[in-house]
């Protein structure tokens, strides 16, 4: 029995020495593994840049961000912020200019407690990278006291925007906007 145990130990010792010698031998490098890693990293970086561009820096994204800023200023009834999103060259089909639009907005702000825009569809068409035509379908809800009124577009409203000399994108005209309101609900919260 003792002899057998000794033979077993010798086998284990030989096996562990063999394993150690294999571990200390340098492994052959696979040809191109570093190159493949660099190519994969470059592809991932390029894809990330494309995504960042389309989400944050493309003309469509920049016009949409400006439009959303104007919507937010309108919903928060902030005429000072809203004026930053309307071009000094604003003129619509009715001949209204920027001061008239701001005065109309301020009248809405003082007449209603809450203003909420629900946009059902927004299409943005970029024109030469410097201008945009936004086609919008949706509703604007105005709440005062216990009454809620809705302005719903029968036809899409078209908003024209342009990149101005300071690099900001501003509204230059709104077409198809009418002011026919209807009473729709007692609580604006039910509509959101």
Image (cartoon, rainbow, N blue to C red):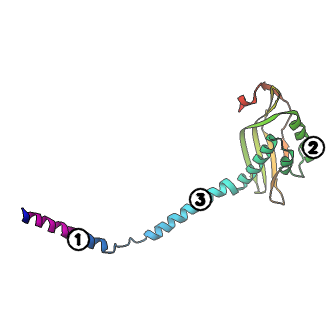
Decide if residue 50 is in sight here: yes
Predominant SS of the magenta segment:
helix
Q: Is residue 45 magenta?
A: no
Q: Position of residue 121 (x, y in %)?
A: 71, 39
Mark 1 and mark 2 in contact (Cβ < 8 Å)? Answer: no
Q: Is residue 30 left or right of residue 100?
A: left
Q: Which mark is residue 18?
A: 1
The stretch in magenta equals 4-17
10 Å crowding of disc 3: few (<14), some (14-19), many (20+): few
Residue 33 occupies which quadrant of the picture?
bottom left
Q: Is residue 14 magenta?
A: yes
The count of marks equals 3
Residue 167 occupies which quadrant of the picture?
bottom right
Residue for badge 2 = 100
Q: Nearer the viewer, mark 2 or mark 1?
A: 1
Give the residue at x 78% y 57%: 130
Q: Position of residue 110 (x, y in %)?
A: 88, 36
How far separated are the C-alphas under marks 3 and 2? 44 Å
Q: Position of residue 70 (x, y in %)?
A: 80, 46
Picture layout, residue 184 above or below residue 79: above
N-terminal label among 3 and 2: 3
Give the residue at x 8% y 63%: 4
Q: Which mark is residue 48?
A: 3
10 Å crowding of disc 2: few (<14), some (14-19), many (20+): few
């Amino acid at each position: 029995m003792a002899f057998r145990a000794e033979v077993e130990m010798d086998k284990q010792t030989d096996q562990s020495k063999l394993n150690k010698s294999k571990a200390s031998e340098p492994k052959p490098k696979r040809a191109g593994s570093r190159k493949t890693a660099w190519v994969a990293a470059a592809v991932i970086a390029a894809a990330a840049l494309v995504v960042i561009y389309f989400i944050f820096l493309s003309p469509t994204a920049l016009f949409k961000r400006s439009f959303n800023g104007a919507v937010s200023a309108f919903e928060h009834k902030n005429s000072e912020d809203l004026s930053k999103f309307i071009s000094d060259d604003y003129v619509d089909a009715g001949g209204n200019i920027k001061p008239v639009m701001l005065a109309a907005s301020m009248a809405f702000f003082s007449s209603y407690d809450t203003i909420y825009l629900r946009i059902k569809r927004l299409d943005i068409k970029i024109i030469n990278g410097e201008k945009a035509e936004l086609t919008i379908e949706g509703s604007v809800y105005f709440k005062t006291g216990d009454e809620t009124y809705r302005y719903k577009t029968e036809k899409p409203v078209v908003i024209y925007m342009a990149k101005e000399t300071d690099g900001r994108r501003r509204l230059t005209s709104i077409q198809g906007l009418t002011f026919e309101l209807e009473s729709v609900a007692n609580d604006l919260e039910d509509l959101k």
